Each structure stands twice: as structure tokens, then as C-alpha cells.
Amino acid sequence: MSSEKKQKEKMFSGIYTPSVTIIDQSGNIDYESMTKHVNNLIDAGINGILFFGSIGEFFSFSPTEKADFLRYISAETAGRVKVLAGIGAAGMKEVLDNASAAEKAGVDGVVCLPPFYFGHSAGRAHDFYGCLCSHTNLPIMLYNFPERTGADLTPELVAELAAKHKNIVGIKDTVDSQSHARRIVSLVKQVRPDFSVLSGFDEYYLGNRICGGDGVLSGLTNIIPEVFVRMHRAYNQGNYAVCQNALAEIMRVASLYEIGDLFISGIKEGVRVRGISCSSAMRAPATELTEKEKAEVAAVLAPYL
């Protein structure tokens, strides 16, 4: 069976964008600019979009703002691309309420952080995800980001959760270690061959696929989606020279993460520089880039302008 056919059999595989959430100067979600951004991503050929993930500043928007936007964007995309909703929150009730709102909005799945701030034990993670699985019929993607949550969804724990809950269908693994995702793939696919393992790091696409993973859910796809799509299609076709060249481009653009106080502002500015006439502002306490930093972003992206 070809690599491309195997990828199509997975619920979530390929190139996924954790979309920025563009706001206007009053701090409200800019629906017009978001629509343009989403359509640009779809036209580039990506496989899906996550709204209100980390780069989408889930922590800055109220449940009502999220629910309203998800209803709008689900209708706007009209089945042209997979739509995922980030439902992470500090309290269980808000997580469940977010899941209910996402389901009503008609999204294709939800992405959920484990309990954070205090971290989690394996037992508490089982209780948490068990409660979520009982609450929603939507497919659930785990979100492992130990640098922010304070605890790791270990490969062993991921395999246990996948074996126990059929509606847990994948993971975004944001761990800066290729071996972590490799170990998840090795353990989880023994019990769930259909389970999707996506890397949260842009540069790890090739390593992820080589070890048996399924793609990326990573920030630079907001800015250069066409490069990721080119790499993904080339990998599925066995054209590894094209993959190598695309990866070299991605690694160069990854310097954007080092610009500014919070990397999200650099990603937002990159979206603006690439052609969306919008603000790159963030809600306080985060701050927009300085003019000098904006010039640095433009310099990185000069080959694409």
C-alpha cells in the first residue's frame, strides 16, 4: 500500500495549522481577516486547521468568543478542510463546556491539553481524559506540551489512553525531542494502528514520518503553508530531494520563533507580511512586536514576498 493511501486512511494526518487568532485594534476577533487567512491556508492545500490552540491564544478568549467563532468558521470552511477546536482550560467544567460548544459548532475534532499548572499524575490524566471521552462524541486529539503544562504525557501513558478510549484518535506531541515521538509511535501503534501522531515542531516533519508518524501541527504553516504542502506531497510520492529542499526552507524561517517577547507575535506578524492586511496585535499582557522586530520578520520572509 502506498504511503499516500495509508495517510488518507487516518482521521488526522498530513499538514495541520494551529491558526493564529487575528484581532482588531479594539481587541475583538477580526472575522474578515480570519476568513482571508483560513481561505489562504485551504488554497495552499493544508489538511486541517486548529483554532484556539496555543498559537491561537486559547488563554485570551472567553468561552463565548470561542463558541461564536467556531460556529462561524465551521460554516465558512464548509467541509473543505478538517476543523479542530482547542478546548484546553484550567478547570474541568470549562473543558467540558468548550467540548460541548465545539460539538454544536460542527467541528471535526477537539484538541485537549491535560490538566496543567500543577501538572498531572498518570492516574489523574486517566480520570481527566476518561471524563472528557464520556462527555463528547467528537474525536479527541491529545495535546502534549510539558514545557507549559508541567508534566509529560509519556509514550506509555499515551498508549494506555489510546487502548482504553476509541475516541482518542491522535496526539500533538510538542516535545523538542524526536525520540519522544518515535517512542509514542512504537508503543501506541501496536494497540491502535489508526492513531495519528503529529509533531508540534515544524522541523520534525521528516523525522516524524520516517519513524511512522503522520505529519505536523505546527506554527510556521500559518506563514509558508505551501512549503509544508510541497514537502508532504513529495514525501508521499517518494521524492525525497524535494523534501530536503523544503525542510531547508522551513529551518531557515524557523528563526521567526526567536523574534519578540512571545513567539506568537512573530507568527502573527509573518501572516501580515505574507499578505493579510490585518493587525498583528495580541491581547494584554502580551505585546506586539516593535518596529525593529517587524523589520526582522520581513527580512526573514523576503524570499516569499
Image (cartoon, grey):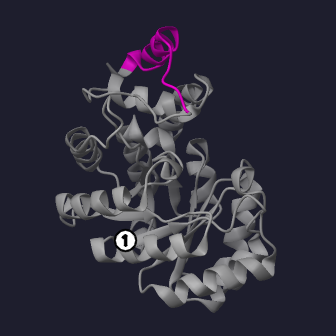
* Residue found at x 51% / y 8%: 292
Residue 240: image location, x then y, percent:
50, 46
- Amino acid at pointer 1: Ala
* Residue found at x 78% / y 70%: 120
Q: Quadrant of the N terminus?
A: bottom left
| Relative height, residue 191 to residue 94 (above, below) | below
| Relative height, residue 36 to residue 177 (above, below) | above
Taking depth in this image into account, of 216 and 149 the one nearest to the observer is: 149
The prevailing secondary structure element of the residues shown in magenta is helix
Q: Quadrant of the C terminus?
A: top left
Could you classify mark 1 by the number of other residues whose Cα lies within 10 Å: few (under 14), some (14-19), or many (20 or more)?
Answer: many
Q: Is residue 31 visible?
A: yes
Q: Specify whether 180 is left or right of 271.
A: right
Q: Is residue 106 visible?
A: no
Query: In the displayed image of the protein, which residue is found farthest to the right?
Result: 121
Residue 15: image location, x then y, percent:
43, 54
The answer to which image quadrant residue 254 occupies is top right
Q: Is residue 14 magenta?
A: no
| Relative height, residue 305 to residue 4 (above, below) | above
Query: Which residue corresponds to mark 1?
Result: 102
Q: Specify whether 87 is left or right of 179.
A: left
Magenta residues, start to end: 286-303
| Relative height, residue 128 to residue 31 (above, below) | below
* Residue found at x 57% / y 32%: 263
Residue 6: image location, x then y, percent:
44, 73
The mark tally for this picture is 1
